[in-house]
Amino acid sequence: MNKKKIISLLALTLGATTILASCGDESTKISINDKGNLVVDGKEYVPQNGEKGEPGTNGTNGKDGSTPVITIGENGNWFVDGVDTNQKAQGAQGEPGTNGTNGDDGSTPVITIGENGNWFVDGVDTNQKAQGTSGDNGLSSYELYKKYHPLYEGTEEEWINELASGDLADSYDTEYNIIFTLATVPPVLSALDCIYYGNETYAFIERGKTYNGIDDVYNFHSIGFDKNSNNSSGFNNDQFNLVVNKVKELNVYGNEKFNIYVQDGTALSALAIAANAELTDNQFEIIMVEDGTGAYEEFNNNYLAPYNITADNDAIYNNYADKVKEAEKKYNDIYSKNDNNISDQVFNYNIGDAFAYAALDNFTYWLQDENQIIDMLEAKSNGTTHTALLSSFGVTGYDDDVDYYLNLRYKSIKDYVNDLSDDEKTDYLTLMYGSYYEDTYNTLTRTTLSDGITDVPSDKLVFIGSRVNGYPKIASSDAFGVGGATSIDDIPNDYASLADKYKTPLLFGSEEDYLVLLNILNDDSNYDSSITLDQKNAVKVACFNYYIDYMMTLKFTYALYGENYDIIMKGHPREVIGAYSEWSAHYEALGYRYDKLMDLATLAFHNEDSIGKFIGMVPYGTAAENLAYLGANISIAGLPSSTYTGYDPDVDVQFVISLVDTAIDTDSNLKSRYELGNLTYTYEDSIYNTKFINNGNMYLHLYKIYKNYGLTELANSYKEMYTNWLKTVLGKDDVSNYSVNEQGFIDERN
């Protein structure tokens, strides 16, 4: 006969409920103690760091309620307090069959509490009260639980059933991840953590395309963001409230734990989520995630650079302590309310404050580069004296007696990716790239062109691109000696009639290359039937100019690096090449939108142009940091982008093209890494500085490229442009002793 679990309610007291769940000879004792906490087989399930509430005023004790004792009598009936209920505890065994088969299982009684407060067995009133009368201040076990878990909405009967089933006990071990982040790096790091640990994860991110494949990843759920968006405008209160309501929905028993991931500059928004969702302080942990090099800049600017230390005054630590005290006040103010509004002034973006919040309970700061932090702190030592902040940061070798210690964790994207299993890595890349994952991976690990025959270099150079109309105007601008089309007459229908200035190796070096674009422009099926002739001509001129800038930039890159690197162009998330209908920004001329034409022209360049076909293409790379870990020997380069600040410093940056007159130290995306000395790349075991191709270097490189092609006249024209640029920048007529170096600085020869 199969044994079924029989729940015997052995004791119910005013201060605690005890339930014995028995199965055969084994039993599990479940109770609620006088603290309102769940106890299973002697193990107390109590939230960590929970504090006991203030005791209420003692009331007059009531008389003890009678606790029913439920037993099985010798006659096999259920007895309550010694009274025979005339209900059999077990059905009679069936007659043996011819093959000796056991009889039917006995029935297991269903024990409930009726509306009159009595115990019922199989629907029969036992006339025994389930609970004695409480004293003036006495609380039932259910009421005790509700007192300590005010968000629990279940009835007393539901609570007892959940207690007996184990669901209540399980809730103490239930953990959720909530991702509510801006930017790109924080969602990447947050996803790695959530995938690695496997908790159910709910996300609302600013740049939805970063999690383009969220629907295809196990345990990941969108709270309602647009996965095709690359919006960078922050969060509003409606979006904030969506997240708060999701947390409330998941917090069924009031015991669940929540890990809330936010960008480091928006730490208080996570605290507001916890406060508005009415989580207790043992239910949540806020993980402030670094967003690139800004964290280290802010640490230096706010905590180190303005202060010094002496034998008598550690101004660095004292300043930090003051900031922690300010952070505590903000914490208490926000956490004391459940109607916080993230548009309030207190929620202003501030990366520097994250270091102060890291000293508070419930906050952890996740940084990628521990060595950089240590170096910055130790650099403030004066040989005999050091700042106690080294001890606050837990730096080995320092043990000053300090009041504040930071909750920190260090792990880079690269290290985390390497720690993932193959299945986890697939989930991670699927999350980032969605339906584009396979094409992206195949491109970044390719060994031949699409023909399967033509070999490509094993070292990959990922070109960080932009929308096509964001490429430098090195062809369409007169400043670089070419100049774009101004009318349809500049785009003839035959190569022979094309102006010679376009017939160069970096533009249309052959008739075949010109026809790649011309065929797209002249195909009527690429336009709506409603387009007017004026609109079509305007569209052709605009498309031609964007195309030649795009083409010349990539052919310029190929001329410099194509021999040693397989160049892969990374598209822009707002402009996925090959999917123009999904673009969030558009191309228009005279009121006509020509996204389709621009898309087709770009695809044709990469598929058919004599040089373009050697330049690989990944559809987009919002989470650009992933590209460095998809294939072997990958380095990056390209147009100005915050991407460079998000990469692990171990990832080589070959060059950045920025058509300005200044040097690398003025670029907002490169300045901090330049100052830290980690803007480098390695080639053939030698380390080189990242190149900064400003206006001067662009002229100089074009001069050298065309000189190598044997186009002396064209080369000399760029040499003259370079000389004139030096004269303009320096304000000198004689610049014979000056030159621009590879990082854009002008050197003077002695």
Image: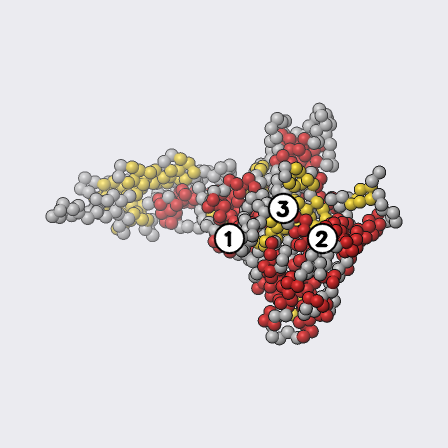
Pointer 1: residues within 10 angstroms few (<14), some, or many (20+)? few
Q: Foreground residue, 379 or 172?
A: 379
The N terminus - image quarter? top left
Q: Residue at x 67, y 70 (%)?
A: 493
Residue corresponding to mark 2: 709
Amino acid of disc 1: Glu
Q: Foreground residue, 226 or 592?
A: 592
Q: Which mark is residue 564?
A: 3
Residue corresponding to mark 1: 438
Q: Foreground residue, 40 or 14?
A: 40
Q: Provide residue 209's location: percent of width, then percent of height.
A: 56, 55
Tell me, yes or no, if residue 233 can be seen here.
Answer: no
Amino acid of disc 3: Asn
Q: Residue at x 63, y 58 (%)?
A: 610
The label nearer to you, 1 versus 3, is 3
Q: Provide residue 705's location: percent of width, then percent of height.
A: 72, 51
Amino acid of disc 2: Tyr
Mark 1 element type: helix
Q: Earlier in the sequence, mark 2 or mark 3?
A: 3
Q: Earlier in the sequence, mark 1 or mark 3?
A: 1
Q: Which mark is residue 697?
A: none
> CA gap, disc 2 to disc 3?
18 Å
The label nearer to you, 1 versus 2, is 2
> CA gap, disc 1 to disc 2?
38 Å
Q: Residue at x 43, y 40 (%)?
A: 36
Q: Residue at x 26, y 39 (%)?
A: 24
The C terminus - image quarter? top right
> CA gap, disc 1 to disc 3?
25 Å
Left or right of 347? Residue 25 is left
Give the quarter of the image for residue 387: top right
Residue 534 drawn above or below residue 683:
below
Q: Provide residue 367's location: percent of width, then percent of height.
A: 60, 40
